[in-house]
Amino acid sequence: MKIDPGSHVPIYLQIAEAVRAAVAAEVYRPGEALPSLRALALQLQVNPNTVQRAYDELEREGLIHAQRGKGLFVSERGTTSAQSRAEQTAHQAFDKAVRAARSAGMTARQIRTVFDAALGDNEKRENPS
Amino acid sequence: MKIDPGSHVPIYLQIAEAVRAAVAAEVYRPGEALPSLRALALQLQVNPNTVQRAYDELEREGLIHAQRGKGLFVSERGTTSAQSRAEQTAHQAFDKAVRAARSAGMTARQIRTVFDAALGDNEKRENPS
DNA sequence: CCTACTGCACTAGCTCACTAAGTCAGTAGT
DNA sequence: ACTACTGACTTAGTGAGCTAGTGCAGTAGG
């Protein structure tokens, strides 16, 4: 897990995102324990409170749950929650993008063209003639 | 022109966006004078500095140019600049959305479905069978 | 018990974005 | 010249967000 202290993105959000991705990728599975606040804080060279804030975020999302004195554990539906949440984020991002394009006076056809261009960078397949 | 002081979006950005839209819609045409700092500040009930910051933003984008003692004027290429800038913003928004979807592990087909759903709210036409 | 771990809560400080007040400088009509 | 407008600049205050320091409370093993 890597953190960029020079980024404009707050540390706790970077941590939350990294853990979320790890849960989605099943690096940590439901029921398993996550690194403790202090352990992760030591590893990342940040304050334990910063790590806790990241974990708070994930707990609010239902990905993990904390047990005082014992540790932090991935929730039963943690893996699927992480994945569906990521999809929801993507959905919101598209909503925002469409609104931006609409306010620019672009037609649906033009918007579709821009979308295709954005998607094209990674596509290369999936569209057999 | 309307400003929402309760919004989490800074006032100066709201003003900049409103003026940008007005220029793109040719409410103000190239060569025409824009409302003065103090006039617009009085109308919107904000500090002239806040309006100036908005105008600074637009000047940096090349939409308008200021003449000390005379006023602010829409640049020659102001209209097209405003439009192309809006398109560029839309493009960046789609890039970001696609990256978010990719990091969620979504396939190109799934991404396309989400995009169609986001676009669908305003479409209703333009796709004659 | 006692020790060493765990998460939790309270507080403080620090930075930075935003907004505002006031002043300086250029333009133009009278 | 004078006056009334224009934008440009300096400075200051305010508030929110982020991070860290410190101590408390629960758990478990020796």
Image: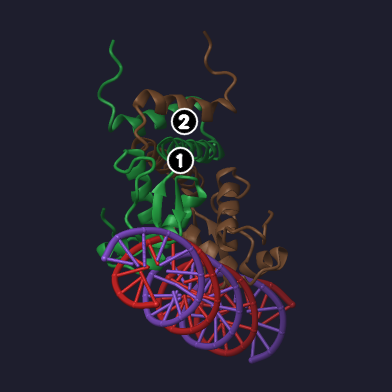
Chain colours: A brown, B green, C purple, D red
Tell me the chain of label 2: B
Residue B10 visible? no
Identify the element where label 2 is drawn. helix
Residue A90 visible? yes
For residue C20, above or below residue B123: below
The Cα–Cα distance between marks 2 and 1, rounded to whole angstroms, is 9 Å
Q: x, y percentage for residue B125? A: 26, 21
Q: x, y percentage for residue A80? A: 48, 43
Most foreground residue, A50 or C9: A50
For residue D15, above or below residue B117: below
Identify the element where label 1 is drawn. helix
**Residue at image x 51%, y 45%?**
A79
**Residue at image x 29%, y 58%?**
B3
Tell me the chain of label 1: A
The residue to which callout 2 is attached is B111
Looking at the picture, which amino acid does disc 1 mark? Answer: Ala
Q: x, y percentage for residue B105? A: 54, 36
Looking at the picture, which amino acid does disc 2 mark? Answer: Ile
Q: Residues within 10 Å of mark 2 (few under 14, many from 20)?
A: many
Locate residue B117 relative to residue C14 in the image: left or right: left
Quarter occupied by the N terminus of chain A: bottom right
The residue to which callout 1 is attached is A90
Specify the quadrant of the image occupied by residue A71: bottom right
